[in-house]
Image (cartoon, rainbow, N blue to C red):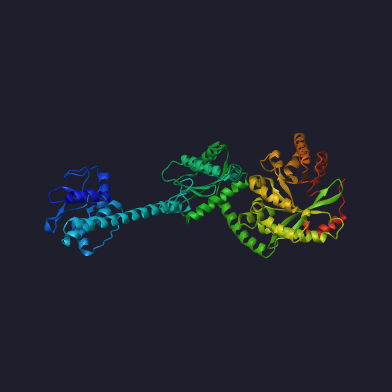
Amino acid sequence: MMLAFTVAVWPQVNSNLFIVWMSGYAIWIGITFLAHSGRILGKWRDRYETPILVNMISASRGIWICGIALTNWPAFIQGGEFFWTLTTLWAIALAAQTIMVTVGNDYFIQAILATAIVMMAATRQWQISIGTIFFLIPAIKALDSARQVRMNEVKLRTTLTYQARYDGLTGLLNRVGIEEQFSELPPGPLAAMFVDLDRFKEVNDRLGHTMGDELLEQVGQRVQDVIQHRSHLLARLGGDEFFLVLPGCPLRDLLAISDTILNTLEQPFTLTSGQAYISASIGTATTSGDIANLEQLIRDADQAMYRAKEAGRRRVIYYDQSLRQDAQERLGLESSLRQAVAENKIVAWGQPIINYQTGTIAKVELLARWKLDQKNIPPDLFISIAANIGLTSDIARFMVNQAQKSLEKWKKIPALKETCITVNVEAQDLVEGLVVDYLENLVFTEQIDPAKLILEITERGLIEAESKARFQIDRLHTLGVRVAIDDFGAGYSSLRSVMTLPVDLLKFDRSLVAGATQDQRMQNVLSAMVEMASSFKITVIGEGIEKPEDIEVMKQLKVHLLQGFYCANPMPLKEVSNFAKEFLPHD
């Protein structure tokens, strides 16, 4: 009767414990143990494919308590010797009624705990009866519940550990993961590679974030396929930035691998929504082993990558001592620029834009200028630094404030009272909306006439952020502020793509103006562009007018306005009013 009752009740419990009656029949074998051993309830024999502990001890009243049956034998051994034996279990069982053992294998823990409880029952001379079974079942169920909790904790810990060290999108190492593995590398020469995708924001905005993620996954896989040595480390640092560490890789092989990655990434990517094309800029660096840490190696390769971007993208630049010196100087400039912006030491200059048909100043472009230790810092340099450290929106708001003050003063100057002011804004700042918010406040409080303000955004930046920029441009138009595309022709976009944006002015890049004076075909192209822009009621401005021939060609092409050194040099704002009074158009 007792045997039948036990078999009917105990299989509900998921345990690796088994108990052997002195007659040799198994009263109960846990479901989990059955699943792993392939055994069935029945005659217990000492014949198994894997080792088990079968020593038995004799308890009072003739009850035989069997040891632990393990499906994971290595977990039973510590330091090559049997660690958990019946002797040690017996001591634990006598020590406390409730025991907790921390061992790496869950099945092992379960068996230890369950066996210890049965041992305690025997030690305390409990009879294995229906009453005792009722006691043991809740105990074992509690143990199984604790085991499930522990298994869930282990799974959660494993998941969190993985997430802390690996990128969730690509499965590659993340910054934490590569730092850990980098610290375990043996001393020796190292090579590093910083890979940054070109124009990824454009692809991401155009195709959507889902397709952008799919593209990043495929990029990671392609780069992984190129580096096949097991010691090579590949991580996604974030966004579209990938970093590689190649231990023991000579410079020749480093450059070969980087060229292969460049070529591989320029092959079309097949996404769910269709094909996508991308390129990359790569910075490389090497060390003989004396580098302080991984961060220094990342900075060196990152600096080389930025130089590749500045050189035109789609190329590899190797980090050398000159770049290190540039980086140190740049850090000094960053600190000084932060201070200059905070203390309003950036000044605004103006360059008149001429209407050659009326002989008047149609507009004035405000240009940021910065002098450090009596030395003029090139605008392209400090604006690029400002973009990297997040100061461009502060500079843009300062320039808008200067525009507001100038427009107020120019109301009293007949030659300037109808003149508009243009202010340069980074595309990212436009997208984020901070500059638009600032303008909105000025317009609503009637501190500025929106009809006399134009924001200039570079062609490349505007096209790359097209979908997000469109919303902000609509906001500007609602306020009455116009938008110009600056440096048109310096990027990769077509005129048709530009015409789809709700812009009001188009500024030909100086390279187009210079080309038109030397090439009839270029003149024909620009003539078609002017005609198309005019049909959209877009005003065209020719930049880089530096000689009389430039003016003549622009007139022939019917470009509306002219800007350049031959028309007027940039000058402090206080001098613009004097220039306007004395201005006489060139014949």
Viewer-proximal residue among 219 and 296: 219
Out of 130 and 343, give the one closest to the viewer. 130
Residue 299 placement, left or right of 494? left
Write down the quadrant of residue 397 in the picture.
bottom right
Q: Is residue 463 above or below residue 297?
A: above
Report whether residue 187 is seen: no
Q: Is residue 195 left or right of residue 91?
A: right
Horizontal and vertical percent position of residue 435: 68, 56
Write down the quadrant of residue 412 in the picture.
bottom right
In the image: residue 477, left or right of residue 152: right
Q: Among all residues in the image, which is located at the extreme front?
A: 1
Q: Is residue 90 above or below residue 33?
A: below
For the view shown, which residue lies furthest in the bottom direction? 343
Tell me what residue is drawn at x 12 percent, y 49 percent. 23
Q: Quadrant of the C terminus?
A: top right
Whether residue 100 is visible, yes or no, is yes
Q: What x and y, as percent, mark residue 459? A: 69, 45
